[in-house]
């Protein structure tokens, strides 16, 4: 696993816990696109990403997240993760992160599956 991916993921998890606008903004290029759900139009630009993130924010300590890379190149990483919230709510996640030359995300797409939904 590259240092860039590890550092980016650590930054993401820190921003998730803190909901600090500067920590969120630091993850993304100024013109980044973030799809909070698959098949929806992405939110574009750091300010819009921060505003949407904060409108959907989890409370610090409400969730735990484990992850591992499935694909990792200099330009793109695909992360498999699991989000567990207090109680019995859990989600399986796939994240597609496309990196800019400076190591920040220029595109980010979350794919999440509710583990409590019957098959």
Image (cartoon, grey):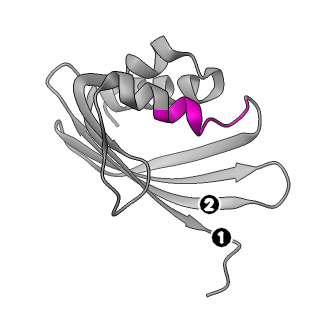
User: Looking at the rendered structure, which numbered label has been put on residue 91?
Assistant: 2
- 57 vs 95, left or right, is right
Judged from the image, the secondary structure of the residue bearing numbered disc 2 is: strand
Name the residue: 61% across, 88% down.
119
Question: Which of the 4 quarters of the picture holds residue 65?
Answer: top right
For the residue carrying disc 1, how many other residues have a C-alpha within 10 Å: few (<14), some (14-19), or many (20+)?
Answer: some
Q: Residue at x 73, y 32 (%)?
A: 59
| In this picture, residue 107 sits left or right of residue 55 | left
Name of the residue lying farthest toward the bottom: 119
Residue 19 is left or right of residue 30, and the answer is right
C-beta proximity under 8 Å, tags 1 and 2? yes
Where 68 falls versus 62 (above or below)? below
Residue 27: percent from the left, percent from the top?
37, 23
Q: 72 and 21: which one is in front?
A: 21
Residue at 40%, 31% in the rendered image: 49
Q: Quadrant of the N terminus?
A: top left
């Amino acid at each position: 696993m590259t240092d860039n991916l590890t550092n980016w993921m650590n930054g993401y998890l820190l921003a998730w816990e803190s909901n600090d606008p500067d920590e969120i903004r630091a993850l993304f290029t100024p013109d980044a696109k973030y799809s909070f759900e698959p098949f929806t139009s992405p939110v574009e630009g750091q300010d819009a990403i921060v505003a949407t993130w904060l409108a959907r924010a989890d409370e610090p300590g409400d969730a735990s997240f484990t992850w591992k890379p499935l694909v990792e190149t200099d330009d793109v990483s695909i992360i498999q993760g699991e989000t567990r919230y207090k109680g019995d709510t859990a989600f399986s996640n796939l994240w597609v992160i496309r990196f800019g030359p400076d190591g920040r995300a220029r595109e980010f797409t979350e794919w999440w599956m509710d583990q409590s939904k019957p098959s």
